[in-house]
């Protein structure tokens, strides 16, 4: 079983965990800008918000926890979000032990690799797939840069096809001394999003978000508003989205900054969409570490999640090309985080 002790990346700004190939620390100006826990055990016992986790076998929600007409069958998944399956099911990949970290050189940069083999029937999904996650870190133009690459290969022969989707579920707080994201400045690259029904499932429409200003307009987050938990769309043409988006250019999704700290974060990806979530449902109690240290509670709006991904419920018939994987095929995606202080 993979170790659950923290592992330093080639760049000391980052710490990762084998469980869920999670990002535990992203340090900027000697401050950790991601929400998490100081000990790995809490990621298993108290991580209902999915802090730092690698999400899979699918991201976000699957309507009614069912996949229809796949291998000529209907697959009933675990419903953990009302009637829907959320972030891969009861545990999902974020609670699984990945193999690694293995020290690697990827695209000419020093980094680490994590691997997880999801067997046929894992969380009721069909087919055996192998997921690889690469983290590489470096400095570019005075910015601390973390590059994240995902690759999922259908390696089993149990069936002809399956569905996949992977992202990272880190939450960011650019004022780490504060318990909320109040005062954070946000700049979104799009105002288009997937309209939702009463169960947070897309209706199929892509429309302007009622709380988002025009693209590339900076706005501030207050104590309680504006509130987001929505899939913002960069590429509105589903038919043009390749199975492996790593061939696509990195595009800026969102820029965050905080005037009180001067900390800035830019998130880029090859993915066509991203979930933007202002953390209204974060609810983690105060904890005590094994050394007796007090770990403060984390409540609503303690952090902002930016999850590069395919569309929500991408397994539906009209969008399935985004996530359908057949024997011998590869699904891929890449994201990048750039952080700096001004």
Image (cartoon, grey):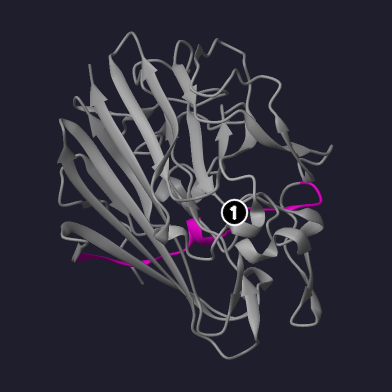
Q: Count the marks: how many?
A: 1
Residue 202, given in percent of the width and then of the height, sits at 76, 44
Farthest residue, direction right: 198
User: What is the quadrant of residue 56 in the picture?
Assistant: bottom right
Q: Residue at x 58, y 45 (%)?
A: 235
Q: Is residue 7 above or below residue 243?
A: above
Pick the residue in front: 153 or 6. Answer: 153
Locate residue 83, reporting x and y percent.
81, 51
Residue closest to the eye, 67 or 2: 67
In which quadrant of the rendered image does the N terminus lie?
bottom left
Residue located beneath label 1 in the image: 59
The picture quadrant where one finds residue 112 is bottom left
Magenta region, residue range: 82-103
Neighbor class of circle 1 (other Cα within 10 Å; few <14, some 14-19, many 20+) is many
Image location (x, y in percent) of residue 338: 29, 35
Residue at left offset 46%, top offset 42%: 51
Magenta span has 4?
Answer: no
Report whether 306 appears left or right of 250. right
Residue shown at 60%/60% (left/top)?
A: 58
88 relative to 117 in the view: left or right: right
Query: In the drawing, does residue 322 fall left or right of residue 302?
Result: right
Q: Secondary structure at mark 1?
A: loop
- On the rendered image, what quadrant is the C terminus found in? top left
Q: Position of residue 91 (x, y in %)?
A: 58, 58
């Amino acid at each position: 079983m993979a170790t659950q002790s923290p592992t330093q990346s080639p760049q000391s700004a980052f710490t990762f965990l084998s469980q869920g190939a999670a990002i535990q620390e992203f340090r900027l100006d000697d401050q950790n800008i991601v929400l998490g826990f100081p000990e790995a055990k809490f990621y298993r016992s108290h991580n209902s918000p999915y802090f730092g986790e690698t999400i899979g076998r699918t991201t976000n929600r699957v309507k009614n926890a069912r996949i229809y007409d796949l291998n000529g069958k209907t697959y009933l998944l675990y419903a953990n979000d009302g009637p829907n399956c959320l972030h891969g099911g009861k545990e999902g990949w974020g609670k699984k032990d990945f193999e690694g970290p293995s020290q690697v050189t990827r695209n000419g940069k020093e980094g680490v690799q994590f691997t997880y083999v999801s067997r046929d029937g894992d969380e009721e999904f069909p087919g055996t797939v192998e997921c690889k996650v690469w983290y590489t870190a470096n400095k570019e133009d005075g910015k601390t840069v973390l590059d994240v690459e995902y690759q999922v290969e259908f390696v089993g022969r149990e069936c002809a096809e399956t569905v996949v989707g992977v992202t990272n579920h880190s939450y960011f707080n650019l004022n780490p001394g504060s318990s909320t994201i109040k005062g954070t400045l946000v700049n979104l690259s799009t105002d288009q999003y997937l309209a939702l029904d009463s169960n947070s499932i897309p209706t199929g429409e892509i429309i302007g978000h009622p709380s988002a200003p025009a693209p590339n307009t900076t706005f501030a987050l207050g104590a309680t508003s504006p509130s987001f938990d929505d899939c913002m769309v960069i590429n509105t043409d589903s038919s043009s989205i390749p199975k492996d988006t790593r061939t696509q250019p990195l595009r800026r999704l969102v820029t965050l900054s905080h005037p009180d700290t001067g900390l800035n974060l830019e998130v880029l990806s090859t993915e066509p969409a991203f979930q933007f979530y202002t953390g209204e449902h974060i609810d983690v109690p105060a904890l005590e570490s094994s050394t007796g240290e007090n770990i403060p509670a984390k409540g609503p709006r303690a952090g902002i999640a930016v999850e590069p991904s395919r569309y929500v419920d991408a397994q539906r018939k009209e969008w399935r090309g985004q996530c359908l994987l057949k024997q011998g095929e590869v699904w891929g995606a890449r994201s990048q985080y750039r952080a700096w202080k001004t």
